[in-house]
Amino acid sequence: MTRNQPQPFVSRQDITPSPQDDKPKALRIDADLLIPGRGKPISNATLIFSQGTILHVGPTTSLSKDHARLEAERKVPFLMPGLWDVHVHFFGEASPSLENVAYTQPALAGFRAARDMLSLLDAGFTSVREVGGYGVDFKTGIDEGWIPGPNIYSAGAPLSQTAGHGDLHSVPLSLMHDKIAAGMPLALADGVDEAIKATRTQIRRGAKLIKICSTGGVMSRIDSPRAAQFTNKELEAVVEEARRTGLVVASHAHGTEGIIAAINAGVHTIEHGSYLTKEAIDLMVQKKIMLVATRTIVANGVDNPDTMPPDSYKKLLEIADSNRKSYEAAIKAGVKCALGTDLGLSNAKLGFHHGMNGREFGYAVEAGMTPLEAIEAGTANGPDTLGPQAPKSGILKEGFDADFIALERSPLEDIKVLAKPDEVSHVWKGGRLVKEPGRGVSILEC
Ligand SMILES: [Zn+2]
């Protein structure tokens, strides 16, 4: 590939012809234990894949003659699907003050975030759902093959009312509107017509879901996480507009009133869900609405008071406990969960940054999931947060994307192995081996 002529990404493994014929070569990996993502783990298992798609998964003893003849490329102790983080941001911001988004040149933001792409793959995350940021653009760059990175399913700009969670409260409003028009990945909408227009604007940019903020938040300056935002009519208009294009809506929602309003408007996922009541939980079970609790940002934010503005830290302390208790209650009641961290800053010195996304598995177990359930939430359930846009991913099964990782130690015995990139020995994305012992994820390999 020449740098000035981007070509669709084709891995070297994909184009290696088999010696017998011109058919793409099938590759084989053997594992002492294969954790499929959904369903029971299989001991002494084999996975066969070709051209980015899984062809077969099952016990090594029951392989077809053709597959049995293949020599295993790799033999690993533990094999499982590539991990999914369903709540990330790519703003390319180095400081936790959100107002900077308005003053950072997009080229610089992209440069910083490039490192996040490598960190995510290195940590075993082959797919992310980005609920606000430059993800739509990074997806294009990764798909074109400029740098390696996860599959990105992005919402484009998160929709906020004026003075809402996605507004930058100290930035002059006229400047906000200018920057948004010029491509800053935030969106302000007031009234049904603007809500519809903002939804269509994200679809136009390539969004795979729509993100709204139905309550205030922690990192925004003047609003309270408990305060409901957007009217019911605005929320319903967004959900309806998204639905007509086959997209689901994810709602940032801490406070109960905004959670219930989002549920009644028909959103697909509740993000954070810090003040869930029994009524909210019952409705989520009944309407099959998923929860993404984002414990990583909450827990690691609490542990790093010096890294965020004092007002935001105060708000974080207020929601931290009920965020955890709501998660526990939701798991107990059978709310379907996926794992999302809310990591989004490009600065490894902050104490919360891309690469530590696997910590979310440990928090899920602490909140009441078994390790196997946490793995399902962080793999197979990931695509489900995208509704009709869900790719065939997150499960080691015939016909699914060939995204998988290998580990030296069992995550079923110690879930925290998934929190450490060093424990992830191999990463395959789209059938291509991008990390193995002695060879890390490299920007020069595309
Ligand atoms: Zn977020």
Image (spheres, rainbow, N blue to C red):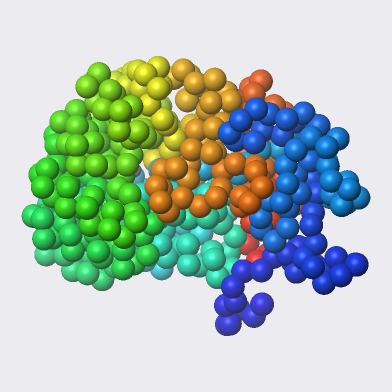
Q: Quadrant of residue 4?
A: bottom right
Quadrant of the rendered image containing residue 146: bottom right
Residue sitting at 55 percent across and 54 percent down? 150
Q: Is residue 206 above or below residue 115?
A: below
With 211 as the anchor, is 441 left or right in this view? right
Q: Please report the residue visible at 79 percent of the width from the left and 68 percent of the height from the top.
A: 23
The quarter in which the N terminus is drawn is: bottom right
Residue 436 versus residue 44 in the image, above or below: below
Q: Point out residue 262 in the picture as x, y percentages from the top left corner.
A: 21, 39
At 15% from the left and 31% from the top, the residue drawn is 257
Q: Position of residue 298 (x, y in %)?
A: 37, 30
378 left or right, relative to 33: left
235 horizontally vs 45: left or right: left
Q: Position of residue 441 (x, y in %)?
A: 66, 54
Residue nearest the viewer, comparing 185 with 249: 249
Which quadrant: the C terminus?
Answer: bottom right
Q: Is residue 123 above or below residue 110?
A: above
Residue beneath the point at 52% across and 36% down:
378
- Camera-nearest residue between 242 and 212: 242
Give the image quarter of residue 335. Answer: top left
Split into quadrants, the picture shows ligand 1 in the one at: top left
Q: Position of residue 3 (x, y in %)?
A: 60, 78
- Whether residue 15 appears in this view of the structure is yes
Asked whether residue 117 is in view, the answer is no
Asked if residue 307 is positioned above or below residue 159 in the image, the reply reads above
User: Foreground residue, 382 or 309?
Assistant: 382
- Numbered marks: total: 0
